[in-house]
Image (cartoon, helix red, strand yellow):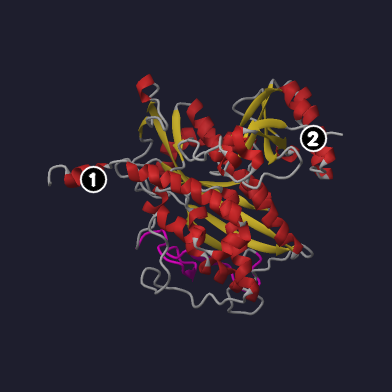
Amino acid sequence: MSFVERHALWSDEQKEAARRLRRIVEEKNLEVIRLSFPDQHGILRGKTLVASEALASLESGCSITTTMLAKDTSHRTVFPVFTAGGGFGMKEMEGAADVLMVADPATFRVLPWAPTTGWLLCDLYFADGRPVPFATRQLYRSVLDQLARRGYDFVAGLEVEFHIFKLEDARLAPEDAGQPGQPPTVSLLSHGYQYLTEQRYDQMEPVLEILRRDVLALGLPLRSIEVEFGPSQCEFTFQPKQGLEPADNMVLFRSAIKQIARRHGYHATFMCRPKLPNAFASGWHLHQSIVARATGENAFMARESGEALSAFARGYLAGLLAHARASTVFTTPTINGYKRYRSYSLAPDRAIWGRDNRGVMIRVLGGANDPATRLENRIGEPAANPYLYMASQILSGLDGVDRQLDPGPSADTPYETRADLLPKSLREAVVALDDDPFFRAALGAEFVDYYVHIKNAEIERFQAEVSDWEHREYFEMF
């Protein structure tokens, strides 16, 4: 029996998808297939196999080193992998040992920008068939399973802001290499400050057309393309989808955009606030609702006239607010992302909600008997790991439902309403998570300690650097 058969890893739908992909590989004469998994940062890592080898490994798995799970955002290994337990407290993880990437056949695609290349998203397993506990796609799936046992599915729609620049210098001289290396030199495609104007859209349309065509060719559920307020900034929005799909779509979208842009002489970045003159911060707004499995009905929809949300939704909303500070490390996982939380902007700075108000953390959309009723969380940055972002939402919301929490009144003056302030820095967010008993129980102490360790490693590297601000402030003064 194969690894997949022995451990019953595929559903009937996945088995049928595997048969289809084998036919497609043969019909399109594909040469290679990329096997990728989303790491702890939501970045795709993996291996590229010639097509015959990839097909042979579909049910047996493809080995990959566990050090991929030990990296911070500079790709440095921040766990002592050659000690007992490898720094993870697990024999299976020490010595840079291997785990198996097992493909999810339902995710198969042919890459439009590399037409002889197939692509598969994978999950990670130990040799005995156990899921690797630090793999975030499996963690999110376990949260979805909890929700399903209650009779519900999670639905999410994505609004993703990012920047596209003209690539002037890729900075590939040997002296520019490093960990991380020097960032590329870029120029603007538009000056910005003309939010949603047709003129600015047309100015950026040549590259947006390239991106749009390939994103649609990938089968991603694109809805709209908008020019945002800042220079060279845009927003792509996607139709709502259920379960794993919106998170899978997000990791593929980010990776695809960067690859397509680079091939055409552009640089795309999902960094929240680039250090460029006049650059604006980018956010990732997550629209979410819960639907009943039995009926397909939106559980957030109110029945009584004048009500914005059902009782279930009010509890869910209250849970998001109650756990906002600790969940911020999942919605905004970079040091840079906290530069976005500013008062009197289009970004939140405290844990509040409002009806169709863009200054709050949670914007409530819809009303009585409106099947499109949903909560828009405006807290996230586009660099967030979507599996952790969405898992944190479901867990927080269900806790609010279970405890019948009350979200309080709508905040009509979002930057004056008294409420818990969101963390001002990644360190503050990490401390909030580390001290939070709810997430420690919901995600497991093992995962929380793992994630906190990685984030603290990034913070410590940042703290060791002398910034431009420090040099300007103190070099001449003292």
In this picture, residue 145 sits left or right of residue 467: right
Which residue sits at x=61%, y=37%?
A: 94
In this picture, residue 35 sits left or right of residue 386: right
SS majority, magenta: loop
Which residue sits at x=53%, y=44%?
A: 41
Rendered view: 19 above or below 135: above
From the image, state whether disc 2 or disc 1 is nearer to you. Answer: 1
Rendered view: 23 above or below 310: above
Rendered view: 388 above or below 165: below
Q: Amino acid at mark 1?
A: Glu
Q: Which residue is mark 1?
A: 470
Which residue sits at x=16%, y=42%?
A: 475
Badge 1 element: helix
In this picture, residue 93 sits left or right of residue 353: right
Rendered view: 212 above or below 265: below
Q: Amino acid at mark 2?
A: Ala
Expressed as whole percent of the image width and height from the top left, the position of residue 240 reads: 63, 54
Expressed as whole percent of the image width and height from the top left, the position of residue 120 reads: 68, 34
Q: In terms of sequence position, does the residue under pointer 2 or pointer 1 come before the other? A: 2
Which residue sits at x=79%, y=41%?
A: 14
Q: Return the residue nearer the eye: 12 or 143.
A: 143
**Residue 321 is covered by the magenta coloring:** no
Q: Magenta segment range?
A: 344-371
Expressed as whole percent of the image width and height from the top left, the position of residue 79 reads: 52, 40
In this picture, residue 349 sits left or right of residue 257: left
Q: Give the number of the disc on residue 18.
A: 2
Expressed as whole percent of the image width and height from the top left, the position of residue 409 reads: 49, 78
Residue 221 makes an appearance in the image:
no
